[in-house]
Image (spheres, coloured by chain):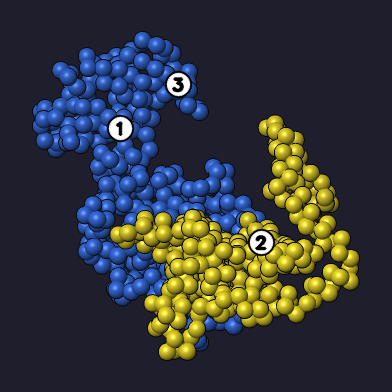
Chain colours: A blue, B yellow
Amino acid sequence: MEVRVVNVRKEFERFPALHDVSLDIKSGELIALLGPSGSGKTTLLRLIAGLERPTKGAIFFGEEDASQKSIQERNVGFVFQHYALFRHMTVADNIGFGLKVRHGAARPRAQEIRRRALELLDLVQLSGLEKRYPAQLSGGQRQRVALARAMAIEPKVLLLDEPFGALDAQVRRELRRWLREIHDRTGHTTVFVTHDQEEALELADRVVVMSQGRIEQVGTADDIYDTPNSPFVYSFIGESSSLPVKIENGEVWIADRPIGLQAPHAPPGEAVLHFRPHDVDLLDGCSGCIAGTVAASRRVAGTRRVELEIGGERQRVEIELPVDHPAAQKSRVAFRPRRWKLFPTA
Amino acid sequence: MTTAPAHAGWRFRQPSVIPGFGLTLGFSLAYLTLIILIPLSGLIWRSAALGWTDFWALATDRRTLKALEISFGTAFIAAAVNVVFGTLVAWVLVRYRFPGRRVVDAMVDLPFALPTAVAGIALTTLYAPTGWLGKLLMPLGLKVAYTPLGIIVALVFIGLPFVVRTVQPIMEELDKEVEEAAATLGASRFQIITRVLLPSLAPAIVTGFSLAFARGVGEYGSVIFIAGNLPYKSEIAPLLIVIRLEEYNYPAATAIAAIMLALSFAMLLVINLVQTWSRKRYG
């Protein structure tokens, strides 16, 4: 089911949590809402579910205006960070709950509900645990049950609020791969919230980066990583370094020296240069480069990260060096970013 | 979870490394023996001195049986009433914010603090055929004071805080997300209450019930004023014990007390077992 969020605004007691947000989600897509806490990502998810009502704007499921419908009528599957399982019910009863509470002809027979529950339990790879209670399951298992419970009602959209947030790293990675598999097999339109960029970039078809109640950028992992469209996205996704620079005559200057980067279209004046620490060329001599003194150095997996102090104002930037590079404390290193982007000074 | 193997049966679970197990267990046992066990075994001792046939005759005396029936019956009904309305009161206090909530919250505890005789006299004045409420109920054919109904009214008053105060904290801990989950799955408000909320409150409600019930069985002060104390009609077992004492009929008094003790203990034990069982399941 296609989901369209149209000019939605949400205020909590006059405090705006979302400003005029619009988003189109294609049918069958796996979308991640990514942002720091307080960015409004969970609010957006809860609005789609109907757990909150928008102050302004509308949410469409297909052609239907879902914002006029109650939570019960919306038919969404929602998975909570802390599972929210029914403690007093067995795993099978938890999964069958959504079918059991239906009325009249819509309610399948008890046998059918049980069959569905076992089938879903099989899908989430927990066969044989149907008689257990939630208290007898591990965190990862509970979250699988929660997902099976949400899928039992054949939801139009599957919404997951930081589904792996409460689990340890190992289980997270496992469940991440597994969720992707389930999505590919069942094809539910799925939206999940996360603050873990690795999770978002790895798992989602498209990532929605949010900050302070606004959508900053929507795109595939490649779009977001390679062509960030704002300083926020640049610094939030992946590693990044930034330096205040000046634009003159279509060239980028630091203090009184051009650094060999051409910016013919940038307006002259102050700007901020962003680049990735690993995306730099090391230079020997320095005519047109950024040069700095090594202030700190640490080993990160297969590379070495060094912090450089640049110029008289001692701006610090990070770059990556090969492990065997001879740079030591206080030695000078010259480099030029291979890929970079300028943003106007905020 | 326990680490002891399943076949361990009756064995001490390995206490934690923090010292004090021996001391605290020893103290608890000594304290319970001194405060509860010795007085109660004195009771058993005295009634055992009666001999089986005498005991049986006293126990099956029609007046005794009737008094026990009234005591346990009214306490049961009152506890049941309290379960319904106490849970409702707890719900209102937990879920809604309204002016005066703190005052209402404090009012719930009043039956704890008030001397029970005062409560009994106040209720009698209200419900007597000439009292404010009694006057209004009389034309409807409802006689409250000096009937078993009056006993129930007094016991409801006495037992209310037990239910409210046991259910309230558990209700406060109910996870809002569980309700939201049920709603997204299509459950109506009514279904959420009956299928999700009440079952998770059940252990607390059972505890509240058993406390209110136990209190009701033993209640004396408030009941004797409103009950009218007619033998075979509105005479409670604790009163009968006092009557026997005043007649210097100690064996009869201890016999009734011993029966009450056995009945109460059996019922509380059953309730406790139900709770252990449910706690094991729901964790």
- Please tell me the numbered disc located at residue A275: 1
Horizontal side, residue A143 vs residue A335: left or right: right
Mark 2 touches mark 3? (CB < 8 Å)? no
Mark 1 and mark 3 lie on one chain; the one further toward the N terminus is 1
User: What amino acid is labelled 3 in the image?
Assistant: Arg
State whether residue B265 is above or below residue B146. Answer: above
Horizontal side, residue B252 vs residue A204: left or right: right
* Marks 2, 3: nearer the viewer: 2
- Please tell me the numbered disc located at residue A298: 3
Residue at position x 89%, y 71% in the image: B53
Look at the image and tell me in which quarter the C terminus of chain A lies: top left
**Taking the image as drawn, is residue B210 in sight?**
no
To which quarter of the image does residue B228 belong? bottom right
* Marks 1, 2: nearer the viewer: 2
SS category of the residue bearing label 2: helix
Distance in Å between CA atoms under marks 1 and 2: 63 Å
Residue at position x 47%, y 89% in the image: B141
Residue A240, percent across and down? 33, 33
Give the chain of mark 1.
Answer: A
Residue B172, percent across and down? 46, 56
Q: Which residue is mark 2?
A: B275
